[in-house]
Structures are given as C-alpha cells and as structure tokens.
Amino acid sequence: MRSTDLGFRVGIGVFAAALLLIVAGIGLTLANDSSLSLQRFGLDFWRTSNWDPVAGEFGALPFIWGTLYSSLLALLIATPVALGIAVFISELCPQMLRAPLIFLTELLAAIPSIVYGLWGIFVLVPAVRAAEAALPDAVRSLPFFSGPPFGVGMLAAALILAVMVVPFTSAVAREVLKTVPMTQREAAYALGATRFEAIRAAMFYARTGIIGAMMLGFGRALGETMAVTMVIGNNPQVSLSLFAPQYTMAAVIANEFTEAANALYLSALIEIGLVLFVITLLVNVLSRGLIWSMARQMPSRAVA
Amino acid sequence: MNAMGTPSARKILSAIFVGACGLSVVLALVPLAFILFFVVSQGIRSLNLDFFLHNPKPVGEVGGGMANAIVGTLMLTGIAAALAIPVGILSGVYLSEYRGSRFASLVRFAADTLNGVPSIVVGVFAYGVIVLPLGHFSTLAGGFALGIMMIPIIARTTEELLLLVPHALREGALALGATRARAVFTVIIPAALPGIITGVVLALARIAGETAPLLFTSFNNAFFSTSLMQPISSITVQVFTYAISPYEDWHRQAWAGALVLVSIVLICSMAARIAAARVSRARVGVR
C-alpha cells in the first residue's frame, strides 16, 4: 500500500469512526447523566408505578408498559397489512403499478410524525371516541374495553403507530421477498400449487427475514414520540384497556423534560431515555441480524 | 398435498389471499389520502402571506405567522447539513472503499444502529453534551441533534451509490497512476454525485420534519432570532405548541405549518424520484 493511500484510509477512517463514537457516546452520556436516579432507585424504578415528581416518587413501570403495549398492538395491526402490501407489490401487481405504489408507501413513511399527531388530535381521536361510545355494553364490560370513552388513549395510539410502521415493515419484507430465488416459486407452480400456495412457499423460505422486518417495525414503534404523545392521553397507569389514557417512555420525556425542576427528576427522565435506547438497540440488532442471516443464505444476491 | 382439500377450495383460498393483499394496499393508502386531504384542505384555508412574513402574536391576538420558525427550521437544518454531509459522505466512502474490512462492518453496524435510535433519545444526548455544558438551550444544540440523525442516512446512501459506480472507471483511474484518494475524489464520487445529492435532499426533508429532538435542545422562541447561542423557534415545535393549545386561531396556524412541512416532503420526494429516474435512464444509455 502506498503511503498516500494509507493516509487516505486513515483520513476518511476518522470520519467513519465518528459513527462508532456517537453510538458509544449516546450510551455513556445517558448512563452518566442518569447516575443519580440509577443509584437512588435501582431496579425499583422499573417495578413501581407511582410517578409523583413533586413528592419525589419515581416509578416508571407505567411508561415501559405503555411503550411495549402500544408497540405490540401496532405490530399486531400493522404486520398483516404490511406483509399484504409487500406481497402485492413484489408478487402480484402489474409492473406498471409497482413504482407508483412504492412511491406512495414511501410517502407514508416520509410524512413527519408531528403531522400524524396533528391529524390524530383533530381527526382520528374524535372518530375513535365515536366508535368507542357506539360499542354495545356487553363488549364494554370486557377488560380490553373498560372505562369511559375519551377518544385519546391506547387505541388511538396503537392505530396511529400501526399506520406509521406499515411502510417500514413492508419495505423490508419486500426486499426480503426479492431475495427468494425464482426457482422456489417455479417449483411450487410445477407441483400444481395455486398462487397462494406458491407465495406461501416463498414466504416460508423467507421467514427469517420476514420476522426481522416485523421486529424492525416494532423497533420503530417503540421510539416513536410526537404522534403518540399527542393521542395517547399521557396518564401514567398500567391498564389492559384500549380505552384508557396511558403514557409511553418517549412521551414522558417529550412532555416533562423541560419541566424537570430538580436534578433527581431530570436524571429519572434521562434513565427512561437510557432504557429506551437499550431496548431499541437490542430490537434493532436482533432484527438486522435476522435480515442479514437471511441475505447471506441467498446465493444470488449476496448484498441486501 | 393431502391436506390441501379439493382443487376448487384451494383456488377459492388463493383468490381470497390475492384479494386480501390488494385490500391491505387500500388499507394503507386510505390513511395517506385522509391525512393529505385534511392537511391540504385545512392548511390552505389558513395559509397566507402573513404566515411567512410575521412572527407569532401574543396569546389572545388573532393573526401573526411563523416567520421566525421558518428561519429557525432553515438554520437548524443548515447546521445539521454542515455537520452531517462531510461526516456522512466520507464515512460512506470508507464503507464502500474498504467494504471487506472488519472495521467497515463495525461502522456499518453502528450506522444501522444509529438509524434505529429513537429521535427523542438523540435529543436527550444533545442535551447532555451541548445544552448542559453551555447551560442554556441553543440553535447549535438543535442543529447538532438533527445532524446526528442525518449522518447514518447519508453514510449508507453514499455507500450504496458508490457501489453502483462501474469498476472500469476505478480501474481506469488507478491504471493511469492516480492515487486512491484522487481516484475517489475526481472519478468515483463525481460519477455517483447526482444520486448522492438526491440522498442528501431526502435526508434534509426528513430532518426538517423532526420535532422530538428539538423540544429540549433548540427549545422555542416567540421572537425572531438568528443567534446560534439562543433558543430558536422551528416549524415543527411551533406546530406542536399550537396543536395542543386550546385556541382556535392557533389550531388554524398549526394546520398551515403542517401543510408547509408536508409540501417540503412532497416536493423533495418527487424531485428525488424524477432525478433518480433520469440518472438510471442515463446510466442505461451509457451501457
């Protein structure tokens, strides 16, 4: 290697190293700035659900519950739709429609979260409230639908999250389906399979990557902030009810960070950020791992 | 094969499946149509020249606009671009030039990880490294947070586009005795430049719509400011403030702000799509 080439490599390597530094820096900064709360509360922080900053009580269980519950619901709603779109675009639709449909689904991902939130407050929440109020009493007595119909609450949050997550999951699922060799489908058709059976075979072949796509969507939902903050009702409670106003980790940081009047309060919020960072990191690493391992199996298109 | 039932049942199941896939496309496009319809119809009614030329009026007074927030968003994205374009493009060059190396896979992994970090967490990070040491909210902190979010997007886009540049170009440059640096900067990057610019524009559009990382970095400012060291208003934070307020006139302005944000995204995505189509057509022509 020529010395100028080595200099070039080191020179741009410094910029590449910045990416590693940033990721490490986020973890270290958050851990350092939340040390007060980490030391004071320990694991109890995540086991108790009394959030009363004025009295100095910080229990973050409702936030982690709200984040996981809303993201899980969004995953349940979004996955079938996202997979349907991926299959439709990559397997079924005429060539002519493909590019416009991809553009439109990408647009869904490009709309800012704050616009989703604004639409959520003024259009979705009133619609959800009307739908909730219209449910028959027999259904309302179930734990999933208990409580008064506010409109704002878990259901509205899960719905808006689902819409926001669909384009991510479907884009990755589409890429994954592309890596399935054509021979897989041809073999299925040659055996007399119907369209559904051939596609099912392709999806089974791509199952690792499809699970990865679902998890990537889940990771997106976990960290989504503005739209959820604006429709979930911001009430820290652990409830199964879809009608109940609840709270998420991202939302409590967004709402209370500038109001945190003392060091302990601020450090508690930063600890919530730290745990959100760690959770999304794990989910992302796992999903990327799945998608990569799927791409590596493929003989034809090694680069995914 | 025995569990599949009679052929007709299988065909019906297949038709139902195809129908369900088509339906899911409709299910996703309905919210998109709804959102665009409301943003455009509500926004158009509220958007006027005042919106672009005036600062917000105090509570209770009708009228005013978001001039300060528009300038704020421009400054914030400008700072983000100044930070993220060099770092992003150069690390993208590293990823594509030395793609086999272990360090490159580590950096690629970090880029994908950073891409998945929630924006609110990036905001907390920027608070920790800039707002706390400085002791106050500032444009700089907000721009820094947005820049951090932009770096991995640009790095990965640059990498992908550089990999598309034909090998013959690189070999030609190296055969003529160019150093690697020279080959990269005078041959390879220029060949991929239109695509890279498209990627940067798309990243800018995405960053301009971010709210969460700004809430406690650049904060908000009711007055016109261009100072790097003072809090500054932005369209997104202003829309958030207005949206959760109880005032009718503020809701009106929130919709107008949303229309501006959506227009930025729409124009950038369409321009990028047209540019991408043109580039790929040109490339086919070369071959």
Image (cartoon, coloured by chain):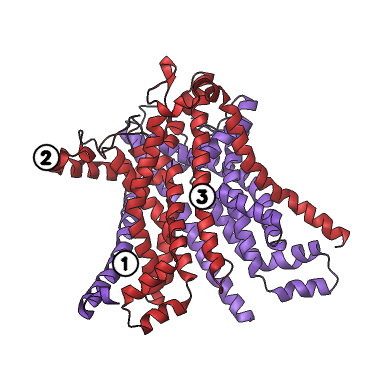
Task: Name the residue nearer the viewer: A119 or B117.
Answer: B117
Q: Residue B22 appears in which quarter of the rendering?
A: bottom left
Q: Colour of chain B?
A: purple
Q: Are marks 2 and 3 on the same chain?
A: yes
Residue located beneath label 2 in the image: A137
What color was chain A assigned in the picture?
red
The amino acid marked with disc number 3 is Asn
Instruction: Identify residue type, mark 2.
Output: Asp
Q: Which amino acid does the dot numbered 1 rest on?
A: Cys
What crowding class fits label 1: few (fewer than 14 Cα within 10 Å), some (14-19), or many (20 or more)?
many
Quarter occupied by residue B75: top right
Q: Residue at x 24, y 77 (%)?
A: B11
Q: Residue tagged by mark 1?
A: B21
Subunit of label 2: A
Along the viewing direction, whichever of A188 and B40 lies nearer the viewer: A188
Q: State which quarter of the image contains the N terminus of chain A.
A: bottom right
Whether discs 2 and 1 lie on one chain: the answer is: no
Q: Chain of mark 3?
A: A
